[in-house]
Image (cartoon, rainbow, N blue to C red):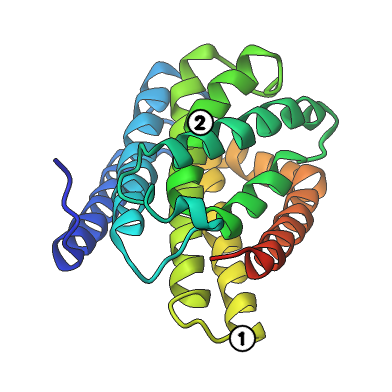
Amino acid sequence: MLPTKKPLAYSIIVGSIVLGIIVVLAFQPWGPGLGPSFSPARIALAYVDAFLTLFLPGVIVAMLFVKDERFKMPLIRAGKAKKTVFSTYILTAAAVVAAVYAVGGILTGINIDIPALITGFTATYFGPAVSLIAWFVGFFVRWTIGGAPWLRTALLVPTLAMVDAGTWALASYIYWRIARVSSKYSVVKIALGIIAMLAIHLYGWTSVYAWALNPAPAAIAYIAFAFSTWYPTSVVFIILGALVGEAMYRKAKI
């Protein structure tokens, strides 16, 4: 059972992230030693990187979130449901947003990151527990219906599911810690929370999909491609979705 005591939980999160970074640095994916892009060795490293630096920390913060009485999920009916990560409320919300996310992924084939709109919204409206489950399950559905045409091999589906789930659980938790610990509305805190989410999102996809899976020349080329195509739309949609989620949360009965 994973810890829900904050000092221990935070220690495990930091330790897991540091260990993941050490493993990646030890294998030096920027060099030729692991073979060409998307080689079996690189895919294995991507799994380790995604699990240690994103997914495991994401699972822990989701558990911390549901136990923290300072965080109130929207709708009064959710009051008694916010006890476990797998409450009916959380699973239902995750199923709904995962379906929207999966269908929206079809447009990524033309380099428009529509799923970022729903991930940003879910992060600020529902929180990390819904984000964790929705994007882990949602990525499998998204890939199955053709919403991830850029994915080179099916072997990476679980990896990218862990990346999305962990990234947005962490991003959402940090947002709520910045913007929601105090009930007092603060534009500055909301802005800082969104900036933090963007930073975590940037780390997530560059760390795993760019650097772990490619030698340096290919990684740099992919990042340059991303910044000139889909990534700007991702930033815009994350901000828009987050602001809509924040506005709806403030209007909801908590």
55 or 25: nearer the viewer: 55
Farthest residue toward the right?
A: 110
Q: Determine the residue positioned at 34% across, 54% down.
A: 66
35 or 97: nearer the viewer: 97
Q: Which quadrant would residue 41 be assigned to in this image?
A: top left
Q: Which residue is mark 1?
A: 186
Q: Quick one: SS at disc 2?
A: helix
How far is the residue under mark 1 from the one under mark 2? 34 Å
| Amino acid type, label 2 | Leu
Residue 253 % position (x, y):
59, 65
Q: Is residue 73 left or right of residue 143?
A: left
Q: Determine the residue positioned at 52% across, 39% down.
A: 164
Residue 212 visible, this angle: no
Q: Which mark is residue 141?
A: none
Q: Determine the residue positioned at 41% across, 27% down.
A: 42
Residue 117 visible, this angle: yes
Q: Which residue is mark 2?
A: 160
Q: Determine the residue positioned at 71% across, 22% down.
A: 147
| Amino acid type, label 1 | Ser
Q: Which numbered disc flags the more N-terminal residue, 1 or 2?
A: 2
Neighbour tally class for label 1: few under 14, some 14-19, many 20 plus, Cα within 10 Å = few
Residue 224 % position (x, y):
72, 47
